[in-house]
Image (cartoon, helix red, strand yellow):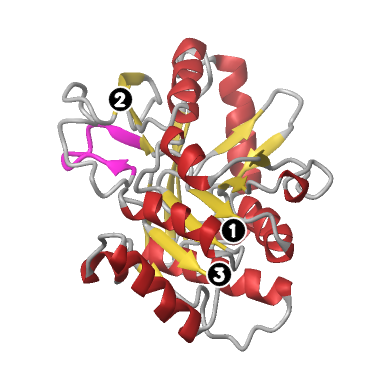
Amino acid sequence: MQTWGSSPRPAGSLMLVREDMAVEGSVSGGCIEGAVIEAALSALETGTGQRLDFGVADETAWEVGLSCGGKIAVLVTPVAGGGLPAASLKSMAADIAARRPVAISFDPTTGALLETGDAGSDTGSAQNRDVSGRQSGLSDDGSCFDFIEMPPRRMIVVGGVHITQFLAPMAQAAGYDVIVIDPREVFVTDARFPGITCFGGWPDEVMPDLGLDERTAIVTLTHDPKIDDPGLQSALKRPVFYIGCLGSRRTHAARCDRLQEAGFNEADLQRLHGPAGLDIGAKTPAEIAVSILAEMITVERRGGS
């Protein structure tokens, strides 16, 4: 729910614990997970939640590993019982799958559900305060914990090329939903991109149906203007947070000239990151993929293009 000082995980971090002790996610760097799991198993038995506070000044500090000087407040609440109804959890999952932000408010002491709803609506305590910062946390008066969950970040790559074969799984591991688009269907097979959503079509035909939003990044990698440029034009018309284009500075200058001829202005062109990726001296496809992903994360964390 809340952190003070040095803490490796932000407010709103999640961990799921089942009765068979299967665990997904984390609420710290590993220092308090054991104690939280014990509390979660107890909540499953009793049907009631509780607040856990950990800090270096506590007598249990070394037991839970908080030797870094930070403090963490964790809310433990069961699904069903006196906590989060299973129906609300399913509704939340459906909203996230549809790329809709959601907000749920809990009693910060018992974990009881207070309010739930679409974070874009004007009802419910979580919506009555500013959620534009997209951060979970305690309300100003401490009376409720507002959990804000935004849609996953998403990366759409134009071009099922060698670099993409490294970039796609790297981005997935970093929490991105990944889509690869290429009209050359031989480049977007399941064998080349196992577990990745692929479209064998032209970018300007596929992208309008994908709902390009401020949680989306676009990367063009084919080196072929007749494939890349339609994707860039679609991206520049939408509020995506990152647009990266592979190619040299000379290639990028020619690309910008073509886009200007197509009607885009200087402000539009300033949104393009070309050559794509941080300058880390990357040479191999895998290294280029690392540089692109690093730049995407940097841009997103600093507030967009």
Q: Amino acid at mark 2?
A: Asp
Q: Which mark is residue 29?
A: 1
Question: Is residue 123 rendered magenta in the image?
Answer: no
- Disc 1 packing (10 Å; few <14; some 14–19; many ≥20): few
- Disc 2 packing (10 Å; few <14; some 14–19; many ≥20): some
Q: Amino acid at mark 3?
A: Ile
Distance from label 2 to label 1 (Cα)?
Answer: 30 Å
Q: Residue at x 74, y 31 (%)?
A: 21
Q: Which label's residue is closer to the chain start, 1 or 3? A: 1
The location of residue 33, given as percent across then percent down, is 62, 47
Q: Nearer the viewer, mark 2 or mark 1?
A: 2
Q: Which label's residue is closer to the chain start, 2 or 1? A: 1
The span shown in magenta is 136-147
Instruction: Kindly identify which residue carries mark 2.
Output: 118
Residue 143 located left or right of residue 178: left
Q: Which label's residue is closer to the chain start, 3 or 2? A: 2
Instruction: Kindly identify which residue carries mark 3.
Output: 292
The location of residue 55, given as percent across then percent down, is 45, 57
Residue 285 located left or right of residue 241: right
Q: Nearer the viewer, mark 3 or mark 2?
A: 3
Vertical placement of residue 65 versus 128, above or below? below
On the rendered image, what quadrant is the C terminus found in? bottom left
Is residue 210 or residue 86 the one in the foreground? 210
Q: Is residue 30 visible?
A: no
In this view, the residue farthest toward the bottom is 281
Q: Is residue 259 visible?
A: yes
Distance from label 3 to label 2 (Cα)?
Answer: 32 Å
Is residue 60 or residue 237 the one in the foreground? 237
Q: Which secondary structure, mark 2? A: strand
Vertical placement of residue 292 versus 114, above or below? below
